Image (cartoon, helix red, strand yellow):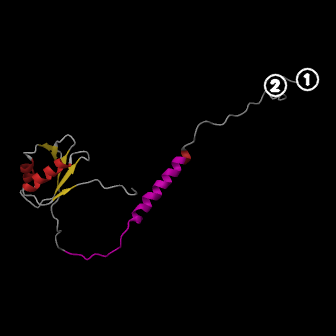
């Protein structure tokens, strides 16, 4: 009996299968979505604090001004009142106009982290010499775990 040309004898007809070089990311995405949902559900439960049943009152809030005024100082020294750029000479009159001449209106001063500390103190001094008493510095809160 002769051998046929397409036979399996001799191993010429069978190829070795190569492993797939593509990574299947679908299971990874599924796991990440499940973890995201778990963390979204459990994060509100992790807030620390003591549950207290606060009494009800009809008194008005102590701090009743609606929105604080923000003064921003950029790295290049430019001064902003809210989103509007102002000069150092215009700052006090603009603050008085926005606060309706209320010296107790809250004013927040924001400054770039790389700016000279003296410039920040000069702006704060200018605001307090204009008669405003509630001036505070804003800082970015550190992220938890650091």
Residue 2 got which mark?
Answer: 1
Residue at x 47% of width, y 58% of height: 38
Query: Viewed as shown, does residue 120 lie left or right of 38?
Result: left
Q: Nearer the viewer, residue 1 or 111?
A: 111
Q: Position of residue 92 (x, y in %)?
A: 8, 50
> Looking at the magenta stretch, what is its main secondary structure?
helix
Q: Position of residue 16 (x, y in %)?
A: 73, 33
Kindly check if marks 2 and 1 are in contact, taking CB atoms under 8 A apart as contact. no
Q: Position of residue 138 (x, y in %)?
A: 23, 54
The quadrant of the image that shows the C terminus is bottom left
Residue at x 7% of width, y 46% of height: 90
Residue 6 got which mark?
Answer: 2
Residue at x 77% of width, y 30% of height: 14
Q: Position of residue 108 (x, y in %)?
A: 18, 55
Boundaries of the magenta span = 28-57
**For residue 143, what is the image quadrant?**
bottom left
Magenta stretch encompasses residue 97: no
User: From what the image shows, is residue 132 above or below residue 26?
Assistant: below
**For residue 114, what is the image quadrant?**
top left
Q: Nearer the viewer, residue 135 or 43?
A: 135
């Amino acid at each position: 009996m002769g051998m046929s040309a397409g036979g399996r004898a001799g191993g010429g007809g069978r190829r070795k299968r190569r492993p797939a070089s593509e990574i299947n990311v679908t299971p990874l995405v599924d796991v990440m979505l499940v973890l995201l949902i778990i963390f979204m559900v459990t994060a509100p439960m992790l807030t620390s604090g003591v549950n207290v049943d606060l009494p009800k009152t009809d008194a008005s809030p102590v701090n009743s001004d609606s929105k604080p005024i923000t003064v921003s100082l950029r790295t290049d020294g430019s001064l902003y009142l809210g989103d509007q750029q102002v000069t150092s000479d215009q700052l006090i009159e603009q603050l008085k106009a926005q606060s309706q001449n209320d010296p107790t209106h809250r004013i927040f001063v924001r400054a770039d982290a790389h700016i000279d500390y003296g410039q920040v103190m000069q702006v704060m001094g200018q605001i307090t010499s204009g008669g405003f008493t509630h001036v505070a510095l804003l800082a970015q809160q550190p992220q938890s775990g650091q």
